[in-house]
Image: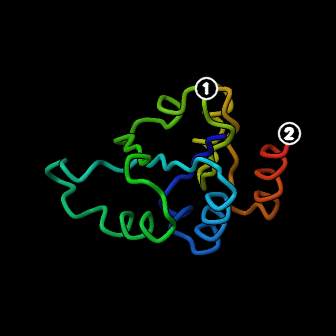
């Protein structure tokens, strides 16, 4: 089972980092899809220091970080992911409209974790 997290304002939050760690402990394949540019983009060098620190702390393989380079994330999710957790309603709506992945928005939503768990336990 594969799930995905946004980074900024999502996996950057300690509460969500704890949840991602819990998923990894359970054997869930955790990925990150971020609108950021990779480190080799000239204008963005050293931009991802915080991301790499969190990824290491959570235990996510660096090969499972997808830099979408300001392109809508649904273009990169394909059909393999159960859900993608994000703080952006627009991203979630586009994911829900264009893929089989379920976009879940946690911003202002206290039930996000329940939604994630329900989809994992189907």
User: In the picture, residue 15 is in which quadrant?
Assistant: bottom right
Q: Looking at the rendering, in which quadrant would you find the C terminus?
A: top right
Image location (x, y in percent) of residue 108: 73, 63
In the shown orientation, is residue 66 left or right of residue 16?
Answer: left
Image location (x, y in percent) of residue 43: 17, 53
Say if 63 sits above or below 110 in the image.
above
Q: Looking at the rendering, in which quadrant would you find the N terminus?
A: top right
Q: At x 54% / y 63%, what residue is drawn?
A: 11
Q: Tell whether label 2 touches label 1 (CB within 8 Å).
A: no
Nearest the eye: 18 or 69: 18
Q: At x 56% / y 61%, what residue is drawn?
A: 10
Which colouring convention does the figure follow?
Answer: rainbow
Q: Is mark 1 on a helix, strand or loop?
A: loop
Image location (x, y in percent) of residue 59: 49, 63
Which mark is in front, 1 or 2? 2
Residue 122 is tagged as: 2
Distance from label 1 to label 2 (Cα)? 17 Å
Q: What element carries label 2?
A: loop
Q: At x 60% / y 30%, what residue is drawn?
A: 80
Image location (x, y in percent) of residue 118: 84, 48
Task: Name the residue that disc number 1 marks.
Answer: 79
User: In the picture, residue 69 is in which quadrant?
Assistant: top left
Few, some or many residues within 10 Å of mark 1 (<14, 14–19, 20+) = few
Say if 14 sits above or below 119 in the image.
below
Q: At x 61% / y 61%, what residue is drawn?
A: 20
Nearest the eye: 26 or 83: 26
In the shown orientation, is residue 68 left or right of residue 3?
Answer: left
Few, some or many residues within 10 Å of mark 2 (<14, 14–19, 20+) = few
Query: Which of the two discs, 1 and 2, labels the residue nearer the N terminus?
Result: 1
Say if 46 sits above or below 62 in the image.
below
In the shown orientation, is residue 49 left or right of residue 110?
Answer: left
Residue at the limit of the structure toward the left, as seen here: 42
């Amino acid at each position: 089972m594969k799930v995905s997290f946004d980074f900024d304002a999502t996996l950057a939050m300690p509460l969500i980092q704890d949840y991602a760690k819990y998923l990894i402990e359970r054997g869930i394949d955790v990925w990150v899809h971020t609108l950021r540019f990779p480190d080799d983009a000239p204008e963005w060098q050293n931009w991802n220091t915080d991301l790499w620190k969190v990824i290491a702390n959570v235990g996510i393989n660096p090969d499972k970080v997808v830099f979408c380079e300001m392109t809508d994330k649904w273009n990169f999710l394909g059909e393999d992911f159960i859900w993608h957790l994000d703080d952006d309603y627009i991203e979630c709506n586009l994911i829900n409209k264009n893929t089989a992945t379920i976009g879940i928005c946690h911003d202002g939503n206290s039930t996000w974790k329940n939604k994630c768990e329900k989809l994992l336990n189907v």
